[in-house]
Image: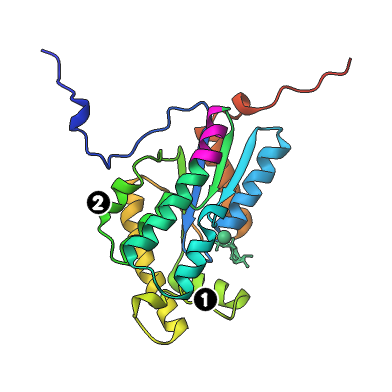
Amino acid sequence: MMAETVEGASSPIAPRRSPYRGKLIAVEGLDGSGKSTQIYLLKRWLELQNIRVSFTEWNSSVIVKEATRRGKKQQLLTPTTFSLIHATDFAHRYERHVIPLLRAGYIVLCDRYVFTALARDAVRGCDRDWIRNLYSFAVVPDITFYYDVPLETAIGRIIGGRPVLKFHEAGMDLGLSSDPSESFRLFQGRIKDEYSRLAAEYQFTTMDATLSIEAQQREMRAIVARQIDLALFARPRQTRA
Ligand SMILES: Nc1ncnc2c1ncn2[C@@H]1O[C@H](COP(=O)(O)OP(=O)(O)O)[C@@H](O)[C@H]1O
Ligand SMILES: [Mg+2]
């Protein structure tokens, strides 16, 4: 007798694998974990091999920028409305940028992906299943690098470069502490707990983010080369007439 597989029976929050020709690589981790540094170096390495590669990062698209700015300024947003605005923003980037490039056979690099929202929104008090359901339109990356770093190391790297923390960046809306740097510390600690949960749930590739930039980059390149047949993504060489 054949095993029964009922499509509708799978949970709506079950991770969806990419059906596209391209490959999706995401980096996640705390502020100051070294994500942007690593993905930039990976991008350069791929470009030098003449590989079709594109980069996108977590920032506000024009369609929600104004709503977010006003909402934040006047503290009008609740965890739910804050989450929905970010989801709209992400959906815009995903459908306009990520999906067309994956269809066209690119390697798409994402500096933060849905997991950033999954972590932050859970810390802000949204229901975890509700958030996963909200983002269930997005495919799970082929590789998600998680830059695992002790809280103190990450905070040390951030505070050095950015003495003034913004209200939401410091998680001040959570009311954990009236001192911005203390609030930031508590907020980041909770985000890290969420990332640990997500790392197991979505099989992140965990990197030791305390190592040197060079050592981490060597490891990242080795993992990418092992898991993706890069030759398939190289542009045909120009031949002279
Ligand atoms: N492995 C590392 N060791 C020490 N400092 C690092 C390392 N990786 C990144 N940094 C520094 O830490 C800061 C934050 O790095 P960045 O890549 O912007 O992190 P993220 O994008 O995760 O916030 C930068 O000043 C960067 O030069
Ligand atoms: Mg960054």
Q: Amino acid at mark 2?
A: Asp
Q: Main secondary structure of the magenta part?
A: helix
**Where 226 falls versus 145 (above or below)?**
above
| 1 or 2: tag closer to the N-terminus | 2
Question: Bounds of the magenta span?
Answer: 95-103
Q: Residue at x 83, y 18 (%)?
A: 239
Q: Would residue 94 be found to the left or right of residue 176 on screen?
A: right
Q: Position of residue 218 (x, y in %)?
A: 60, 47
Residue 52 in sight in this render: yes
Viewer-proximal residue among 102 and 41: 102
- Residue wearing tag 1: 166
Seen at 53% across and 66% down, the residue is 32
Q: Quadrant of residue 4?
A: top left
Task: State the residue position of label 2.
Answer: 129
Taking the image as shown, residue 135 lies to the left or right of residue 26, namely left
Q: Find the residue positioned furthest to the top.
A: 1
* Rendered-image quadrant of the N terminus: top left
Residue extending furthest right? 241
Q: CA distance from mark 1 to mark 2?
A: 29 Å
Residue 230 locus on image (x, y percent): 60, 30
- Residue 151 sits in which quadrant? bottom left
Q: Secondary structure at mark 1?
A: loop
The residue depicted at 46 percent of the width and 41 percent of the height is: 143
Alpha-carbon neighbours of circle 2 within 10 Å: few (<14), some, or many (≥20)? Answer: few
Residue type marked 1? Lys
Ligand 2 location (quadrant): bottom right
The residue positioned farthest toward the left in the image shown: 1
Q: Based on the picture, tell me whether residue 157 belongs to the magenta stretch.
A: no
Q: Residue at x 50, y 56 (%)?
A: 64
Label 2 sits on a secondary structure element that is: helix
Q: Is mark 2 within 8 Å of ligand 1?
A: no
